[in-house]
Amino acid sequence: MKISVIIPVYNKERYLKIILNQIVNQSFSDFECLLIDDGSVDLSSSICDEYCLLDSRFKAVHIENQGVSHARNVGIDMAQGEYLTFIDCDDEIHKDFLKNLYECIENNRVDLVVGGYQKFWDNSDKRIDVNTPFTKQIVNLEDIVPDFAEVQKKCGLYGCCVAKIFKRDFLGDIRFDEGLKLAEDLDFYLRVIAKAKTLYFDDKNYYFYRQEAENSTVLVNDEDIDYYSQLCINIRYKKFLLDVNGYFGTNKNIVDELISNYIYFSVFYCKNNLLKERFFEIINLIDTNSLLLIPNGFMQKLIFSTIKCKSYFCVKLILYVYRSLREIKNI
């Protein structure tokens, strides 16, 4: 078969039949659809099984809940198609979505096809197109490097898991980092793009990305975000730019600012019982990777001064005073 479509599924019964019906009715038919049910506790599991009975191209596997990265890795390892693409189960697609991806990669013989997509909202006519930086062009890796960070900052296109296709054999041993809960797709595609010699940018936004879906992992409180993992991803981002000779100018400024912010967030939002260990882990990362501290605001300057002095006592005191005052204010 030509294409393996990998769909991680977790508690999305409200949307699942919509996307599965759209896949059934694709104008391109030579595909398998791998439904990786990541321990759903709603009706998603039975919906997956229902479509497998209706259409032999659908295959479902039910696993214990271990997160979207593990589910996608299971799908990659199961896949039999010549090409791989990912779809999220709360999104929607045009009837020619798979046909267009297949024609793009077959006709242009590139390592990776990058498509745009369209954002949409339930109960609204609002639509926003996220277009690719090139229009129907084959480009080399070095062509995208100078503006890479600016494009990624503007629309997140390079780190978006969907609306892309590549050969299964091209992927090799690249897999999603299962320890990551956010930005795992950026971490994955940094490694994929670094390996790609040629890319094709399509002009058809046939993938429809639903905003503010139920159970969206995007809606997370600051205190619950693993900022240290995000810091590590952005250190890999810096390494990617260094490896492709792109760590200069706007790229450097954007990534250095991201890293500085995540250093700050990793300390500022760290739980008290983890603070000491995290503080010295961050100091080690800074020293090992020659990271710059670029403060933005008074509190960042304070936190960064404690890091430069390697003073755990001072950062503990600053955060204790800040959190105590905040509690008093909220009483």
Image (tube, rainbow, N blue to C red):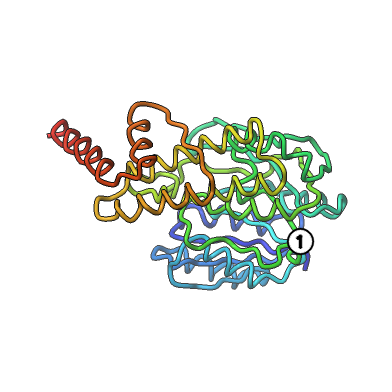
The residue located at (41%, 49%) in the rendering is 282
Mark 1 Cα shell of 10 Å, populated few (<14), some (14-19), many (≥20): many
Determine the residue located farthest toward the top in the rendered image. 297
**From the viewer's perspective, is residue 19 above or below residue 157?**
below
Give coordinates of residue 174: x percent, y percent: 65, 63
Q: Examine the rendering and report whether any part of residue 316 can be seen.
A: yes
> Looking at the image, how many numbered discs can be counted on the residues?
1
**In which quarter of the view is residue 267 placed?**
top left
Q: Residue at x 54, y 67 (%)?
A: 36
Q: Secondary structure at mark 1?
A: strand
Residue at image location 79% in from the left, 54% down from the top: 111
In the rendered image, the residue lying farthest to the front is: 309
Q: Is residue 18 left or right of residue 140?
A: left
Q: Is residue 301 above or below residue 177?
A: above
Determine if residue 221 is in view.
Answer: no
**Residue 95 image position (x, y, % from top left):** 70, 49
Kind of residue sitting beneath label 1: Lys
Q: Quadrant of the N terminus?
A: bottom right
- Closer to the camera in the image, 274 or 317: 317
On screen, 38 above or below 304? below
Residue occupied by mark 1: 167
Horizontally, is 110 left or right of 239 in the view? right
Q: Residue at x 54, y 31 (%)?
A: 125
Vertical relation: 182 (above or below) 300: below
Q: Quadrant of the C terminus?
A: top left
Residue 248 locus on image (x, y percent): 66, 35
Task: Give x and y (percent) for residue 193.
Answer: 70, 51
In front here: 71 or 226?
Answer: 226
